[in-house]
Amino acid sequence: MGAQQNKDYIFLVDDEPIQNEMLKDFLAEKFNFAIKTYDSGEGALKDIKLNPEIIVLDYHLNSHLPDAQDGIEVLKMLKAQLPETKIIMLSGQDKIEVAIESMKYGAFDYVIKGETAFSRMENIINYIGEISSMRAANRTYKQVIAGLCIAFALIVIASVSLVLKMR
């Protein structure tokens, strides 16, 4: 377990175990994430301390577990606790209203279950990785620019000081 403590996590939350395992196997071949699966949002919320980078969340989490909270309720709780985590809603619903509702509550993207869902998921996760890389590069550039500004300001101050001393 020690080797996975430094890994970034993907949580897969779906009450269909076969769907979870198939997606887990697919993503494990494509990405270097520690992948954890859950059959309910409540289970994923218990492991929230792992701070997953990405969560794939089923829209209908209460189809097999009637007492389980649905995907939108879990989405709201997850976004409240992990606002930076990218949550991808996964659903058999192809209604635009469902996708809009998911995005309204903070989903990064919405994927309809079907034959293209896994490749679409791969593309979204790659895109999330690109965004993370660009943000990290942006932070580095900002730090370099701030350092250069400070150095420039010190040079100007030293130059002005020398000119004043020469007078």
Image (tube, helix red, strand yellow):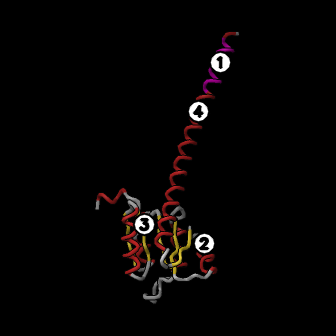
The residue under label 1 is 161
The span shown in magenta is: 154-165
Spatial CA span between label 4 and label 2: 40 Å
Identify which residue is drawn at 58% across, 33% down.
148
Numbered circle sitting on residue 145: none
Identify which residue is drawn at 38% across, 67% down.
35
Spatial CA span between label 4 and label 3: 38 Å
Spatial CA span between label 2 and label 1: 57 Å
The residue under label 4 is 148
Identify which residue is drawn at 64% across, 23% down.
157
> Sequence order check: which comes first, mark 2 or mark 1?
2
**Tag 2: Cα neighbours inside 10 Å, few (<14), some, or many (≥20)?**
some
Q: Locate residue 16: give its quadrant.
A: bottom left
Foreground disc of the pair 4, 2: 2
Mark 3 residue element? strand
The residue under label 3 is 10
Identify which residue is drawn at 37% across, 58% down.
7
Q: Identify residue type, mark 2.
A: Met
> Sequence order check: which comes first, mark 3 or mark 1?
3
Viewer-nearest residue: 101 or 114: 114
Q: Identify residue type, mark 1.
A: Ser
Spatial CA span between label 2 and label 3: 19 Å
Mark 4 residue element? helix
> Sequence order check: which comes first, mark 4 or mark 2?
2
> Sequence order check: which comes first, mark 2 or mark 3?
3
